[in-house]
Amino acid sequence: MSDIETTVVELKAQIDAGEDIQILDVREMWEFAIAHLAGSTLVPMHELGARLDELDRSRPTVIVCHHGIRSLHAALALRGRGFENVRSLRGGIQRWATEIDPTMPQY
């Protein structure tokens, strides 16, 4: 695995350890309303460029989407804009629901 992605198991361990992680959800509002990770911040992908000032560049950031494609593109874009510690959640919220929290609604 490259340093641009993290797994749901790794993210769960970081959350359980109380690490100060910024979780950025780049899905649409309707998707976020169905299921999201507690404490995550919603900034839909099409708004990301205009809302960079809302993100804390100093905190490690994990980007979440449905299956991990949008989040990977967002991670690459943020790295290109000077964010150094950003990673995409491999498999997205779907994998989280499958492997970590089977009570989470799926769509």
Image: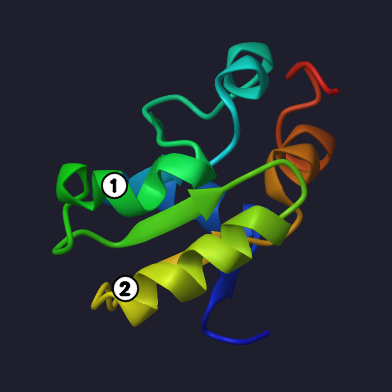
Residue at the disc numbered 1:
50
Residue neighbourhood size for the residue with mark 2, other residues' Cα within 10 Å, grouped as few (<14), some (14–19), many (≥20): some
Res 68 → quadrant? bottom right
Q: Residue at (42%, 44%) from the top-left corner? A: 24
Locate residue 33, reporting x and y percent. Answer: 60, 12
Res 39 → quadrant? top left
Residue 26 in sight? yes
Q: How is the image coloured?
A: rainbow
Q: Residue at (73%, 19%) from the top-left corner? A: 104
Residue at the disc numbered 2:
85
- Quadrant showing the N terminus: bottom right
Q: Amino acid at mark 2?
A: Asn
Secondary structure category for the residue under label 2: loop
Locate residue 25, reporting x and y percent. Answer: 49, 39
Residue 17 in sight? no
Locate residue 64, reporting x and y percent. Answer: 56, 47
Q: Amino acid at mark 1?
A: Ala
